[in-house]
Amino acid sequence: MKIIFLLLILFVFPLNAELYKWVDENGVTNYSDVKPENKTSQEIVIKKQTSRTAHTKETKVKPLLFNTKEQKKPSKSKKRRIVMYAASWCGYCRKARAYFTKNNIRFKEYDIEKDSTAKRKYEKLGGSGVPLIVMGKRKMQGFNEAKFKRFYTR
C-alpha cells in the first residue's frame, strides 16, 4: 500500500525545482536552491515532465557540480602547438600520447626512427632521448604529468 502511495505521488503530481547560479568575486560558479542575497543570479528551472505536464516546455540543464570554476576554452591565439619527437617502442611516449588524447591537447607526433627529416630536426633541437616535447621555442625532455602541466601552462 505504501509503495502505491509513493508511486502515485511521484507520477501524478508535477515536480518543480528551482536552482540559482551565480559567480562570486573569486570567479567560482555557485549553485544553490536558495536565491543569493545581494548577488545577480540566473534562475534555472527544472521541471519533471509527467502526463499532466506534457504540454509544459522543459528546460534542459547539464548535471551540476557545486562550487566549481567554469572552464573556458582558450582562444585561438592562446592555443599551444605541441610537437612530440618519439619512438614506437617508448613507454614514456605512450604515456604522453595517452595524456594528450585524454586531455584534448592537440599535438603532432614524429617517429624519429621512421622519419629521417624528423630525426634531423630532433638532433638539431639537441634531443638526447624520447620523447622530446616542443612547444614554440621551449622544449621538454621525457614525460611526467606534473612536469608537463607546469611546462604547458607557463
Image: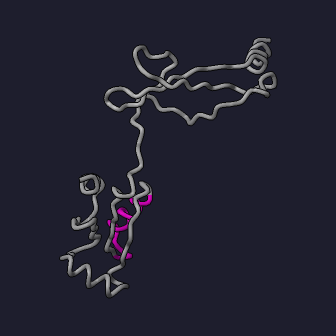
Image coordinates of residue 153 in percent, x first then y, are 27, 52
Is 143 rendered above or below residue 127? above
Q: Residue at x 32, y 27 (%)?
A: 25
Image coordinates of residue 37 in percent, x first then y, are 42, 13
Is 17 rendered above or below residue 151? above
Quarter holding residue 111: bottom left
Nearest the camera: 73 or 7?
Answer: 73
Is 2 rendered above or below residue 58? above
Quarter holding residue 45: top right
Q: How is the image coloured?
A: one colour
Farthest-out residue, bottom: 116
Q: Is residue 14 visible?
A: yes
Q: Residue at x 34, y 68 (%)?
A: 93
Q: Residue at x 48, y 26 (%)?
A: 21
**Is residue 149 one of those drawn in magenta?**
no
Q: Which residues are magenta?
A: 87-101
Q: Residue at x 23, y 74 (%)?
A: 129
- Report the side of 124 relative to 51 (left or right): left
Q: Quadrant of the N terminus?
A: top right
Nearest the camera: 120 or 4?
Answer: 120
Nearest the camera: 80 or 104?
Answer: 80
Image coordinates of residue 67 in percent, x first then y, are 41, 29
Is 14 rendered above or below residue 90? above
Q: Is residue 3 visible?
A: no
Quarter holding residue 49: top right
Magenta residues: mostly which secondary structure?
helix
**Is residue 94 one of those drawn in magenta?**
yes
Farthest-out residue, left: 126
